[in-house]
Amino acid sequence: AGAASGSEALLREHLGQEQNEAVLGAIVKSLASSQDEVTWAAIQQALARADRYQSEALYAALEHAPGPGGKELLLRVARNPGPQRKLALHTLFKLPADANTVRVAVEIYERTPPKDAPDYREFASAQEPCDKFLSQLAGRAIRGTEALSFAQKWLTSHGERAESRDRQ
């Protein structure tokens, strides 16, 4: 955790108060190269309280975040059920594919409960962006168990463990 500069601290404070989605997006773009954990926690809090339009602006800014902090935040949000998950997945899957992004898709497929389970819809909804992402990676349309199988083979062929890792 690096020490935030004075201007970073001011931007972080402004992030906590701003309501305009364009300004929120500009603040996140300004903070995107931060190495400070407090800054990334503030961005995650802004996401948690954002309305639909603010969320879209924040995720668009994260898509262009140059450092590892943005991708780590996207991975964290994408791995956990909730209202931000689908936008996080769509944003994450626009970035270059790597083992972490493919592993998130594997985790979602593997954790999807049976159709009669109360949280089935949440996971089924999260599978949609996974299907699209893995279809692009495969160069053909794939879904569900075929997409899971492809993702596991992709991880193995890239020297990664195919089974999911519990990272919450």
Image: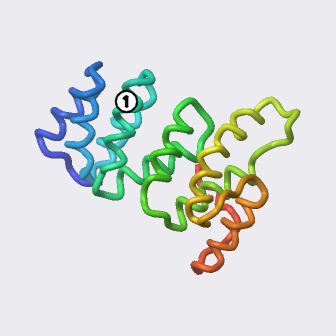
Identify the residue under disc 1. 46
The structure residue drawn at horizontal position 62% and vertical position 72%, both measured from the top left corner, is 155
Question: Looking at the rendering, in which quadrant would you find the N terminus?
Answer: bottom left
The residue at 20%/50% (across/down) is 3
Q: Please, what secondary structure does the residue beneath circle 1 have?
A: helix
Please tell me in which quadrant of the rendered image residue 149 appears: bottom right
- Which x, y percent locates residue 142? 70, 57
User: Residue at position x 74%, y 49% from top?
Assistant: 111
Give the color scheme: rainbow, by chain, secondary structure or one colour: rainbow
Q: Nearer the viewer, residue 10 or 154?
A: 154
Question: Mark 1 packing: few (<14 Cα in 10 Å), some, or many (20+)?
Answer: many
- Residue 139 position in % (x across, y down): 59, 65
Figure disc tally: 1
The x and y percentages for residue 134 are: 61, 59
Seen in the picture, residue 93 relative to 51 is either above or below; the reply is below
Say whether residue 54 is left or right of residue 91: left
Amino acid of disc 1: Ala
Instruction: Give the image location of residue 98, x and y in percent.
Output: 50, 66
Which of the 4 image quadrants contains residue 153? bottom right
Above or below, comparing residue 92 to residue 97 in the picture: above
> Which residue is at 68% across, 50% downward?
108
Residue 150 shown left or right of residue 115 in the figure: left
Left or right placement of residue 128 versus residue 32 in this view: right
In the image, residue 73 sits, relative to residue 163, either above or below, namely above
Question: Which residue is outermost to the front?
Answer: 140
